[in-house]
Image (cartoon, grey):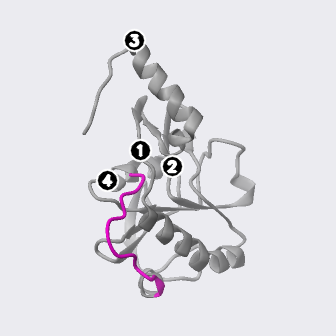
Amino acid sequence: MPTVVIDPAPAEFEALLERRRQLGLDRWDEVWEGVLHMIPPPSYAHERLLSLLHSLLRPYADAAGLDLVGGVGVGHKDDNRVPDMALQRPRDARPQWQETLALAVEIRSPADDTFKKLPFYADHGVDELVIVDPQQQTVEWFALSEGGYRSVERSGLIEVAAAELAERIDWPQGETGASG
């Protein structure tokens, strides 16, 4: 349920934000052009799939000289997105907010906004984007081209194809409610 809180935020809202910070629940939150998106923690099935993707993509990332990490903030404090997984060139890595990524991986969740993130990632020069849809059991691979993304069958960064990755996934059963 989308909710808008007009500034100044009531004390109760500030207390909610602080409680979320203390519990680490804000880890998945994103800020879209100054608007806070409170993302619920991922489900067990989502995290299981993410762990499997780490195992499957690690050898390819290592061979390409890319660092494979979990969700990192792309952008800056007041406008950022947090993919489920990232492959980063070590020379591009920043301590906190990443300016760009080599590759971002997003796992779709019911009613998420994954595809709305594409223009943001393109504006930040993210070279490739992988969208994994557990409900459809598909992997879509996109490459940045002329300021937007085009669908590709195979990564230009790592030696793997979308279909090959999809075949190797032990798809979770049930709801994957994840971090949109």
- Mark 2 and mark 3: Cα distance apart in space: 26 Å
- Mark 3 and mark 4: Cα distance apart in space: 28 Å
Which quadrant holds residue 36? top left
Asked which secondary structure carries label 2, the reply is loop
Of the two numbered discs 1 and 2 on the same chain, state the one appearing first in sequence: 1
Closer to the camera: disc 4 or disc 1? 1
Of the two numbered discs 2 and 4 on the same chain, state the one appearing first in sequence: 2
Q: Residue at x 42, y 67 (%)?
A: 45
Of the two numbered discs 2 and 3 on the same chain, state the one appearing first in sequence: 3
Q: Residue at x 69, y 61 (%)?
A: 89
Q: Residue at x 44, y 80 (%)?
A: 162
Q: Residue at x 49, y 46 (%)?
A: 28
- The residue that label 4 is drawn on is 112
Asked which secondary structure carries label 4, the reply is loop
Residues at circles 3 and 4 in contact by the CB criterion of under 8 Å:
no
Crowding at mark 4 (Cα within 10 Å: few <14, some 14-19, many 20+): some
- Mark 1 and mark 2: Cα distance apart in space: 10 Å
Crowding at mark 3 (Cα within 10 Å: few <14, some 14-19, many 20+): few
Q: Residue 171: give its label.
A: none
**Amino acid at circle 1:** Ile
Residue 1 in view (yes/no): yes
**Amino acid at circle 4:** Asp
Q: Residue 8: give its label.
A: 3
Instruction: Write down the region rendered in magenta.
Output: 168-180
Closer to the camera: disc 2 or disc 3? 3
**Amino acid at circle 3:** Pro
Determine whether 151 is above or below 167 in the image. above
- Mark 4 and mark 1: Cα distance apart in space: 10 Å
- The residue that label 1 is drawn on is 39
Q: Closest to the observer: 73 or 9?
A: 9
Q: Residue 82: give its label.
A: 2
Determine whether 72 is above or below 136 in the image. above
